[in-house]
Each structure stands twice: as C-alpha cells, then as structure tokens.
Amino acid sequence: MSQVLIQAGNRLLNALGRHSELIMQAYVNGTVTERDHSPKVLEQLVQLGVLWRPDPDSELRLKSAVRTLLEGSLQDERSRTINANIGASLASLKTLAEHYKEALHYGRYNDATAHMGDLTEHVYQLTESLSNSVRVMFSRIANEFGYVASVEAKIRENELAQGQVTELLYQLECFRFDELSEIAGSNRELRHLLVVSLQKSFSRAAQELSVVQARLLDLLGRFREFQGRTRLLKGYLLHMEQQPDFVPGNYTRLSQVPVLFNQAASMLKPAFADVNNVSHEAQLQEVVGSLTQLHKRQPEQHASSPDSDIDVSEQDTVSLTKDPIHREVDSFFCAVIDTGQPRSALTYYAEQGLSFDPEVWIYQVIGGFQALNDTDKQYFALEPHGRVDRTFDGNFYINDITLGLR
Amino acid sequence: MMTEQGRVVSKLLQGEFICQVSDEEGWRYLKRRDSAEQIEPHLNLLNRTLASTAEGEVFFAGYLTLGDDERKVLHQQFQETATSLVPLVEWLLLVQQASESDMPVTMGNAIRLNELQSTIEDTPAYAEQLEKISRYRLFGSTSVNLDGQLKQVFKRLTELGYLLKPNSEKQIYLATGKVEHLYEMIRFIDETESLSLSEQAEAAIQQGSLL
C-alpha cells in the first residue's frame, strides 16, 4: 500500500517540477492558456489533480490545494484565504483521541501508534494553520494593503480583514480546554498534544490577533481620514465650479477671530553691525575682508568717469603770507644774531610791546628753533628757565627761554 | 549662541510655522507643556501668543489682542488665503491623482519631482491641469514647457512654506505642517458656511460626473 502511495506521490511531484512554468503561469494569471501547451500534458495534470475545469466551457485553473501550497510557501501578500474552520479540526482531534484510547484499552498497540501519528499530524496542522492565518493578516497590514491602489479599495480590504479576524476569534472560542483535558485524561502523550501544545499556539494566536485587530482599526481610521480629505478637496473644487463668485465670509471681522486665521505678521528684521563692539572686531574684519564687491566696483567707476580737458594754462601764483607771529619770531632770531648777545624771549616781547599771548609767544619761539634745519640749529642755543613741580618730579614749568648764539 | 528657547521664539516671531517636518527640535520643544509656558510671556510682551492647529501638531504665533492695526494685517492675510485656496486645492488634487498610491498629500509626505513629472508628461489631462495651475497669479509661471511650469510651482510652494526641500541637490520635497493648516482652513470654511463639501463630492462621485 505505502509503496504505491510513495510512487504516486513521486509521480505528482515530478509532474509539478516538469511543468513548473505552466503552473506558475496559471498561478499568476489565474487560468491556463490552453493553446500554448500540448493537450496531453494538460490532460495529465488534470488527472493528477493539479488543474481542473470548473465548467465544461471555462478555462483550466489551478486546484485550490496547489494554490494554497504556493501561497503559503511564497508568502505571497495577495493570499487572502484564511482557514478558519477550527471547529471541524477540533472535532476530528477529539475523534482520533477516542480511537487512540480505545486501541490502547484493547491492547492493539500497532493501531494505537498509527492513531497517535494521525493525531500528532492533525494537531500540528491546526497550530500551523493558526500561525499561518495570523501571518497572512500581518503581512497585509505591514504594507498597508499596498496591492490595491485606491483608498476605497484599501478600505474594502480592511473591512474584509476585520471580518476574518472576527471570524478567527470566534473560532478560537471553540477551544474548550476543560473538554480536551478530560479527553486526554491521565495519558501523558495525549495531554502533551491536546493541552500543552494547543494551548501554547492558542494563546499566541489570540494575543497576536488582538494586536492585528487594533492595527486594522487604526488603519481604517487613517484611510477614512484620507478619504475625508480627498472628498473635502474635490467638494471644494466642485463648489467653486458651481459658484465661481463664492467668497468665504470675512472671519477676521468677527469679535473672536478663529485661531486658524489669527496668524501674526513677521516682525523680526535683521540686526545691524555694531562697529564699537570690540568683541566683534575680528568677525567684522573678516566680513569686510570678504567683501569682494567693494574692490570690484572701483575700477568700473574710473572707467566710466567722463574724460575732462586738462587745463594747461599758467596757474595763478599762490602768495604765502606769513603769520604776524612768525615774522616776529624771525625778527627775534635776527635781533639775537645782530646783537650777538643771548636774549630772553619775554624781554624781547616786552621791548617790542607785542600783543600775542605770552605763552603762545614762548611756544612759537621754541617752535621756530625746532623748525630750523640741523646746520642752522648748531649756531643757536636755547635755554629754558623755570622750576620743577614741588609735588610731582619730572614735571618742569617753563617761565621764559633765552636764545643765544653758540 | 542662542538657546533653544530663543531660537524657537525668534522663529515664531518671524511668522514661521513649526512642525515636525520643518523643525523637529523646535517642535519637540513646543510639545513640552512647561517650555510652551516659558515662551508665552516673551510672546505676550510683543502682543503675540502661541497658537496651534492640526490637533496640536503645528505651531505658529497669533495675535494676543486685536486692535485696528492687527485686524488690518489679518484682513489682508485672509484675502490672500481666500484667493489662493483654489490654486492650492487644484495642486493638491493633481499631486494626489498623479501619485500611484492615490493618497492625499499630508504632512511628511515625500513628493519626488522626477516621478511626478514623468507621470504628468505621460498623461495629457494632467499636463493641461498643470498648465492651468501654473498660470494662477499665486504661482505666476509664464513658461510654455511642462518642466518650467512644474519647477516654478514647486519653487513658489517652497517659498510659501508648504513644501521643504531637505537636500538642495535632490528633487525631493516634503510637505510641511502648513499643508495641514490648509486642510483645517477648508474644513473650517466648509463647516462655517455649511457647504457640506464632502456630501457634494460623494453625490458627484455616485453620479460619475466628477473629475
């Protein structure tokens, strides 16, 4: 028996491998284009239960078992089928458990082992289908139903998913662990399968489904928000088309202006450079240094200035008239030279009856002496008369000066 | 160096909108209740107050008390807003329709100019729509080719603060909180004037006559 089964299975898998292209095409397109393939191959695949014809005049399609296998293995996001028939699986589990217990009771150990294998298979199938359903849900949420374009379609997809979650949760309620543990009784293996492993997958599925449900509601809210916004925009345009002269009321005249329309004007303007601020000196210098514009502009201005005629006629002579005090200083020097005697500046001042301020006169005489060139200066000697300040040393008050010849 | 407080206050006084996209640090600062309270006296001193829209996600400075001068400013602003609503709404719908996902433009959305441009180029109806939009005074494009029109519209929107170009070398724009403010304003007008815009749009969709 088993040998025949293995051979048949190998034949099926080989056929799947040989015609993988055809099968994948059918998976992606939904139907097989019969013209492209030989009728013999198609007939073989139909006999193997890979393809089937729903109606006599419809095209060949993939059997749902093959499709589910592909969806599950490829983790295809388009997969929407959720196996929610947990109640039926649980019923078969209970039946198998009863078979097993009966076989044990009568000592038919071979049968018991076979039943146990079946039961194990069923339990793992159930846990796998549970975790698979949750994964399908999550993958659809993760890309926010990216496989459909419009927001409306997304909302419909979301509603479908929510329905499936509700159905799954409803089915999860079929788990009655008190019943299961009663069936398992004191048998260790049964207890492990029916209670421990089922409970583990049950609690994980329930927990994840509640997360899924929350996320779905959240997404639905967002989609509705998007839909609302789109409608608002389209509605506004439509309204403006119908009533082009529509102007919203002036809300700024209301005594309480809505916050939306109360937006203060910009008031900050750039500050100015403070050249007296010493701490900014370095930065300001840098700024000035980088002003290339300043240097560029100057030659332009030169170039643009109009040519002017150069006046080559003789310029008026400028007569430099000497200050009276200068003349008096000169004549004082001359008097010293004439007499050959040293003379006090203030004595000369008194003799000549000069009208300048005496201090200015003394300064001017000193200035006149210092203004001589070095060779002329050698002929004269200037000696100040005065006294040292009583309090502060280094300060010397000049009362008079004497100019003489060396 | 200015403190975060000083930076935020000066941004507000410059009339800028602060949202998570345009200035995340400032936005985080304003989201803390105590820091918002701290800057309030500074704003009050200048007859400003901290205002927010879009469910507290976007901040800006509003007037504290309204005198004649303030009302004049607001009135002018309102006039500008009212005239720019149609161009902006048409632009929002164009971007939404031309993007593959059919999602409305919301705060933080990235708009890739190159992708948008190729979609519009391939669809004559969108190209016509863009030309119409770009001629509005708000955008003021005089360009005859599509590339120039699109660039001008995006440039103006960036100037107006609706879009942000995070990387000056890449043609990717982010929608700021000001877009949310725009939706809020339309919603407000809808409610205040009882226009029931959504219902109008829905009825038109059912009749199959819209856009």
Image (tube, coloured by chain):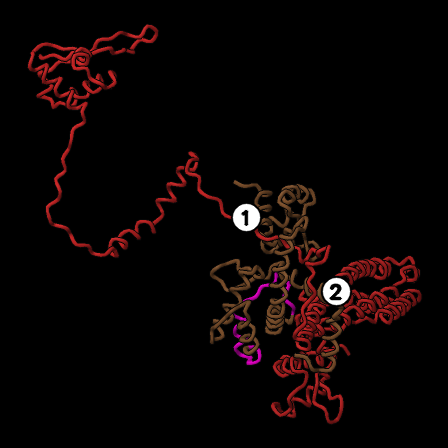
Chain colours: A red, B brown
Within 10 Å of disc 2 (Cα), the crowding (few <14, some 14-19, many 20+) is few
- For badge 1, the amino acid type reads Leu
The reply to whether the magenta stretch includes residue B168 is: no
In the image, which disc is placed on residue B192?
Answer: 2
Q: Residue at x 52, y 74 (%)?
A: B118
Q: On the image, numbered disc 1 is attached to which residue?
A: A268
Quarter location, residue A328: top left
Q: Residue at x 63, y 66 (%)?
A: B82
Within 10 Å of disc 1 (Cα), the crowding (few <14, some 14-19, many 20+) is few
Q: Position of residue A79 (x, y in %)?
A: 71, 73
In the image, which disc is placed on residue A204?
Answer: none
Quarter location, residue A261: bottom right
- In this rendered view, identify the residue nearer to me: A399 or A111: A399
The reply to whether the magenta stretch includes residue B121 is: yes
| A269 over A395 or under it: above or below | below
Left or right: residue A150 versus residue A352 is right
Left or right: residue B94 versus residue A70 is left
